[in-house]
Image: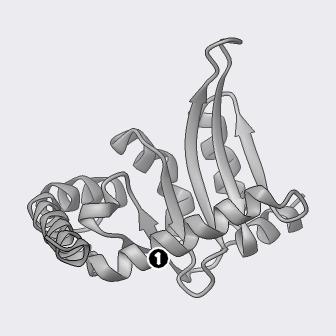
Amino acid sequence: MTTERQEKIGFLLRKNAGDKKHPDYKQKLSKILGTEPDAISFLPLEQSDRVRDAFFEEVRRNEEDETQSRTKVNRASWDSLHQALLKIRDSASDRKLYILLPDADSVGAFPLAERDFLLHAVSLYQEFNESICAVDPLENSSGIMIDYFDDFYSGVVNFDAVFYGKMRELLLSLQ
């Protein structure tokens, strides 16, 4: 079997798995966001793949270049991270971001207003219990990644929001 054919079969298997997960994801998201499940739509998987790949390519490039980079909001608890995100939310806009949840490789990304993402980011993370990203569809280098790290050696738990591109500029303008 050719590599191209294997990739096509892999893509179709991911798409099929995502189609099966959509109802459950819509239910969970509707509870968090306070909307009806039918109001939540996912991008086509091809488009989600392009958004995800372009964003993470920019993240890798920025991490290699110390002069570029990111700004991290690091807190000791989910509540304190949520409070920090709410302060940033006051200056955010209603432009759409594409949200990448843990199963975005099969489910796809979904659009959500920047202000709504900042309001619900911690709840989204807690529901899906893995890192989540919000990506500006017009500028792949701009986004937010929410995650949590438990330092095995020090015992310190860090709750992080990492800001890239325009999102980083917004954060820095508030400091």
Q: Position of residue 46 (x, y in %)?
A: 31, 81
- Quarter of the image with the C terminus is bottom right
Residue depicted at 52% across the width and 65% down the height: 134
Residue depicted at 24% across the width and 76% down the height: 39
Pointer 1: what residue? 51
User: Compared to 120, does 148 lie above or below?
Assistant: above
Q: Please tell me which residue lies in front, 143 or 61.
A: 61
- Disc 1 element: helix
Q: Position of residue 75 (x, y in %)?
A: 70, 35
Q: Position of residue 22 (x, y in %)?
A: 16, 63
Residue at the limit of the structure toward the bottom, as seen here: 138
Identify the image quadrant of residue 100: bottom left
Q: Amino acid at mark 1?
A: Val
> Image check: 96 left or right of 172?
left
Residue depicted at 54% across the width and 75% down the height: 54
- Quarter of the image with the N terminus is bottom left
Q: Please tell me which residue lies in front, 26 or 105.
A: 105
